[in-house]
Amino acid sequence: MRKLTVASSFVLLLVLASFAQTPTPTPKLVLEDNDDVVKISTTLIQVDVTVTDKNGKIIADLKPEDFKISENGERQEITNFSFVSASSEPAQTPLKSKENEKLSNVPLPPVPLKSDQVRRTIALVVDDLGLSFESVYQVRRALRKFVDEQMQANDLVAIIRTGSGMGALQQFTTDKRQLYAAIENVKWNSLGRGGIGAFAPLEATPLEQSQAAGNTTVTPEDLEEERKQLQDFSDFREDIFSVGTLGAINFIVKGMNDLPGRKSIMLFSDGFAICSPDNPDRCARIVDSVRKLTDLSNRAAVSIYTFDARGLLTTGVTAQDNTSGVTAERIQNLSSTRSGEIFDKQEGLAYLASETGGRTFFNTNDINRGLEKALEDQKGYYLIGYQPDSDTFDAKTRRFNKLKIEVNRKDANVRYRSGFFGVTDEQIKKPSNQTAAQQIFTALNSPFAASGIALRMNTLFGNDKQQGSFVRSLLHVDAKDLKFVDEAGGGKKAVFDVLAISFGEDGAMIDQIAKTYTMNVKGDAYQKLLTEGFVYYFTFPVKKPGAYQYRVAIRDGASEKIGSANQFIEVPNLKKARLTISGIILENLTVAQWQKFGDSAGQTTASGSSAAYETNSMSDTALRKFKRNTILRYGFEVYNAKLDASQKLNLTAQIRIFRDGKLIFEGKNAPFELLQQTDLQRAKSAGALILGKDMAAGDYVLQVTVTDNLAKEKRRAGTQFVQFEIVN
């Protein structure tokens, strides 16, 4: 009841005229009048250390004197010490009214998180370059359970495949819709190093087949030479894909470097070998990649937890093996050969985890039990710092400095980062001499937004009778972050590059825009531009339904600052005739403007605004920042609504408001107010609510749910939501 009292300042008002924008074929400019966890520098080496008891629980009461830290065998004096709690809050359960229980199957909108709200940043990395067909099934099942039951309210999560590009689903998010869509795209990669089962089927080699056919010229030496050649080829192929796996993880770690929270990678793989007794050169091929990844992970404060997705294995002859023609020796040694393969591939996973302060989870069919232990491991850690010696950063050696940390506590397990190369963070972060094109592509390809230019993007789905389905992206640009130069006559000029790309589920580029814009303004228009910013918008047609990622990067030519933004959107299939709601368009009015609107209802300008006042729904929809005690108008379209015998609709609509995952306002499921129109397959509607003076500053979500009372139960409800912010 108290939550409902907070929401009492919301008042649903009357239905408004439609203010939806029509799609435009070309883009236009619309001008409107944690501190780092791990630090490696010449003055401080700071590492994070996890200490658990014999039951895997975090030990949080240790003191500096309980630790002993050594670098390259030399004892170091601890100068910095603290314990950091990174516990995540349990997911909130929204309120539900009895009146709306029938809508309980409607998915809840995601909860947007600010940087300081993130407690854990988790990359669930599916090594589809190295997973067997059987393992993929187990991993998909574990991922679903994680999202359903183990993901917490303050978790920032991504599901990333090592064999995919920068597709629509490779994004850190709190949106479970996106994560579920990513899970659906976890499939067996037939071109990877993983086969159908955990082991390659046993079958006769060409020489064994020749020998079985009676060819007496085949000698044991020939068979051994053939075996070695086949093994060398297999090792080489394994190593190529293993380096690919490590390269993908390397990219992910780079992207996580500036993310908040306790950062971890959960790697699901069938493993990779780093050495072979018969092939000593193999160590050099893999270990170098692992060592570089280890150093990068340690600097980014990312711990890697590894899971052998194969579970418990049978090493003897199975149904997939064909022993016909195979030598008796190979059959006899099959179990030991496969046991050795298990150990070799787990060794690579174990080494990667131990070097980055993570854990390994092997020989179990319950992946989620391992995930539970890994998440428990993320709840707290110690930050321990010391002043390095002069030899640590010797420019002549650039050696890898090995760390050793011990704890004076019985039955305590201590995990920490193995070490670092003798290069400071500042030296690594020196800017590279990238061209303008390279800079903007780097910002665009990153999984994370660049903040040199403040951008705010909102991507909306819609459908037009002539053009079909489309996605419109509205990008609000803070003009204060652009560098304007003086022009003759007192004007100001800014030049900036824009690159906008849409990606499909598989990482393939669908559409793109690449343009350079010159903006000339003067006088009051310049001051208004600095105050209000401007909107860049573009429309891409959508040829087929599915998950898409829309990414935009802007580079200022004068300052070389870069801003980027991206958004996930799932485009529905309207041909399935399911009730669907378009993106939600917003418009913000003061109380005075709202009163004028009521006085001049029906009088509109050519731009769609009321003749009695001037607003900009494109800016409001893109920026989505509103003040208290104002009116928020919202508009949308409904597709595929059923018609009764008299060609009329029978729809009801409901709005809900969420804050921090909690339902704070739930309107009644009221009759759908249809605006005057003839195309009932694109039924337009709008509404308004008061943003009350008691609303706290912060992020909110407006959810609109429409119910078609003429449709079948499973296709009856459609929902759409939009995030907005209340500012002081």
Image (cartoon, helix red, strand yellow):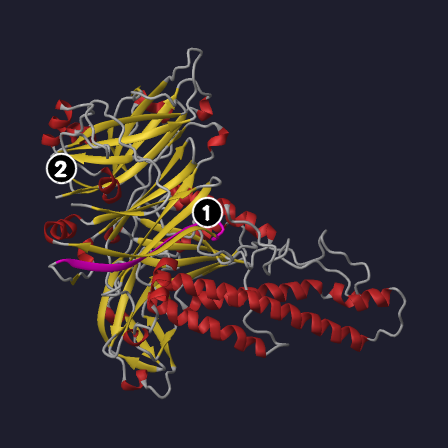
Q: In this view, does 646 lie to the left or right of 200?
A: left
Of labels 1 and 2, earlier in sequence is 1
Viewport quadrant of the N terminus: top left
438 and 71: which one is in front? 438
Q: Would residue 668 be counted in the magenta stretch?
A: no
Region rendered in magenta: 491-508
Q: Is residue 721 left or right of residue 343?
A: left
Q: Is residue 372 visible?
A: no
Position of residue 139 measured from the top left corner of the image (x, y, whole percent): 51, 50
Position of residue 541 measured from the top left corner of the image (x, y, whole percent): 42, 42
Local packing at callout 1 (Cα closer than 10 Å; few below 14, some 14-19, many 20+) is: many
Q: Name the element at disc 1.
A: helix
Q: Can residue 238 be seen in this view?
A: yes
Q: Residue, x 48% and y 27% (percent of image)?
A: 577
Position of residue 563 measured from the top left corner of the image (x, y, whole percent): 28, 57
Kind of residue indicated by mark 1: Ala
